[in-house]
Amino acid sequence: MSVGDTDATGATVEGTRAAPLCRFTTQRRIRFSDCDPAGIVFYPQYFVLFNGVVEDWVDAMGVGFSNLVGCRRIGLPTVRLEADFTAISRFGDEVSMTLEVVRLGQRSITLELRCDAAATGEARMSMRQVIVATSLDTHRAVDLPADLRRGIESFGAG
């Protein structure tokens, strides 16, 4: 068993980790606008960076983030977020941003996201995020769109 696996009762097994259902990785250079006066990433900017990764991932699955939000009026707001900051990223650093789907629910997706130094793999920041599909008209949770679910299931973990 791995972290996130469940036992016969449905309880999560501690100390182990399930293989991700889906993995998406992209490279990015840390920009001046990401940094504070000390020249390191201002911590809230990581949330902006990872939001961009989510948008790119939805686009890569062929769903189209702007179509999902703008035309179909389906949002993917965050309802839970845990973050760990382990090392600094500086202006000009090349980083690898990775998104993994660790749980796919009826209306929610649990993501594990990481920012690592592209050259060395040094961990910079990681977070666990739960996003929920919502109607942008009613602001109530809705089922994940079928094409988004299919995209996640077919995108794979490799």
Image: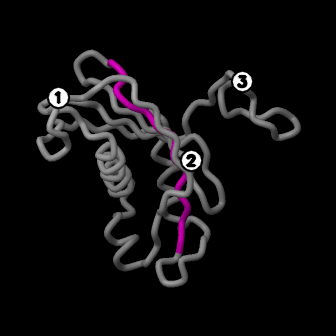
Q: Residue 121, how many percent across, how many down?
A: 32, 19
22 over 69 or under it: above or below = above
Residue 48 lies, with reference to residue 146, above or below; the image says above
Element marked by disc 3: loop
**Is residue 132 rendered magenta in the image?**
yes
Q: Which of 63 and 140 is in front in this view?
A: 140
Query: Closer to the N terminus: mark 3 or mark 1?
Result: 3
Q: Which of 14 and 35 is in front in this view?
A: 35
Of the two numbered discs 3 and 2 in the rendering, the one whose residue sits closer to the viewer:
2
Residue at 67%, 23% (x, y): give it: 16
Where does label 2 land, which residue? 110
Residue visible at 32% across and 26% down in the picture: 116
Q: Is the C terminus in the top left, top right, bottom left or bottom right quadrant?
A: top left
Image quarter in which the N terminus is found:
top right
Q: Are marks 2 and 1 in contact (CB under 8 Å)?
A: no
What is the crowding at mark 2: few (fewer than 14 residues within 10 Å), some, or many (at least 20)?
some
The residue pinned by badge 3 equals 1
- Is 62 rendered above or below residue 26? below
Residue 156 position, x and y percent, is 48, 40
Quadrant of the rendered image containing residue 87 = top left
- Mark 3 or mark 2: name the one nearer the start of the chain: 3
Residue count near mark 3 (Cα–Cα under 10 Å), binned few <14, some 14–19, many ≥20: few
The amino acid beneath tag 2 is Thr
Mark seen at residue 140:
none
SS for callout 2: strand
Point out the stretch of residues depicted in magenta.
Answer: 122-134
Taking 129 as reference, is 29 above or below it? above
| Amino acid at pointer 1 | Asp
User: What residue occupies the far front of the structure in this picture?
Assistant: 37
Residue 93 image label: 1
